[in-house]
């Protein structure tokens, strides 16, 4: 929310990346499908949470497209169309070609892969942080929320003994922790530099 508040106020996406939101949308759609009874029994909470996630990320991406420059707008629009086409293909293929355990495994592996890519997507911005030595364009709240969400779903997956939930969320916990460490390191350096005197005698 703070990131998009800034984008709306400045009427520009500046150097923020839209990729974390694209990956998150795809992940939410696939995980919602995994949690539904047609694929997996007893994981309706996964479908519910990820359905809301898909709605939020769709809204974020629409705002991102509205306020981005033309080149970025075209690429983001193409990516969101690609996400919905890929999801439609996954649903059709899993319903038409697979049944039972095979369907669950197919969607489960896709879900796990999309989760890991979603957790890894904010890492793209780390190169910008290291290059500029600034955390200005690294969304702290996204990394923090990802960290807590991945811990919660890791525990949920362990309780359900569901490999497709606890393994990617365990990886997500580590990746989000790494992002938070990078943020803490460079934000501390920024604060130290701000305290330096403007004129050195």
Image (cartoon, rainbow, N blue to C red):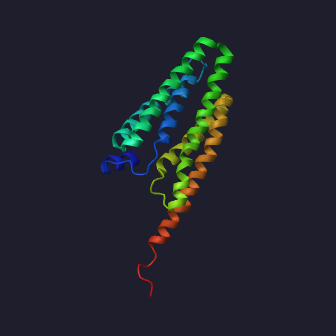
Residue 38 visible to an observer of this rendering: no
Which quadrant of the figure contains the N terminus? top left
Pinpoint residue 31: horizontal percent, then vertical percent: 56, 28
Which quadrant of the figure contains the C terminus? bottom left
Relative vertical location of residue 7 with respect to residue 98 in this rendering, above or below: below
Residue 120 visible to an observer of this rendering: yes
Pinpoint residue 198: horizontal percent, then vertical percent: 41, 78
As rendered, which of 111 and 17 lies closer to the eye? 17
Pinpoint residue 173: horizontal percent, then vertical percent: 61, 44
Residue shown at 48% from the left, 71% from the top: 193
Relative vertical location of residue 5 with respect to residue 200 in this rendering, above or below: above
Given the current orientation, which residue lies at the most extreme bottom position?
201
Pinpoint residue 118: horizontal percent, then vertical percent: 56, 39
Residue shown at 52% from the left, 47% from the top: 143
Residue shown at 47% from the left, 50% from the top: 139
Residue shown at 35% from the left, 50% from the top: 6
Relative vertical location of residue 109 with respect to residue 142 in this rendering, above or below: above
How many numbered callouts? 0
As rendered, which of 196 and 129 lies closer to the eye? 129
Given the current orientation, which residue lies at the most extreme front position?
71
As rendered, which of 11 and 71 lies closer to the eye? 71
């Amino acid at each position: 929310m703070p990131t998009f508040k800034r984008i709306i106020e400045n009427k520009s996406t500046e150097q923020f990346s839209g990729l974390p939101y694209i990956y998150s949308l795809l992940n939410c759609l696939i995980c919602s499908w995994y949690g539904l009874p047609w694929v997996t029994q007893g994981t309706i909470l996964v479908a519910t949470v990820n359905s809301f996630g898909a709605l939020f990320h769709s809204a974020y991406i629409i705002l991102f497209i509205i306020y981005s420059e033309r080149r970025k707008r075209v690429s983001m629009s193409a990516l969101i169309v690609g996400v919905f086409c890929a999801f439609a293909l996954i649903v059709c293929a899993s319903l038409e070609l697979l049944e039972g355990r095979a369907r669950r495994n197919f969607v489960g592996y896709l879900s796990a892969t999309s989760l890991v890519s979603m957790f890894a997507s904010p890492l793209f911005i780390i190169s910008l942080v290291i290059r500029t030595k600034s955390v200005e364009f690294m969304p702290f709240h996204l990394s923090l929320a990802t960290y807590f969400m991945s811990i919660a779903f890791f525990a949920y997956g362990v309780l359900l003994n569901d490999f497709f939930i606890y393994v990617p969320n365990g990886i997500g916990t580590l990746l989000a922790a790494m992002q938070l460490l990078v943020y803490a390191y460079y934000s501390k350096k920024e604060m130290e530099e701000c305290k330096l005197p403007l004129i050195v005698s």
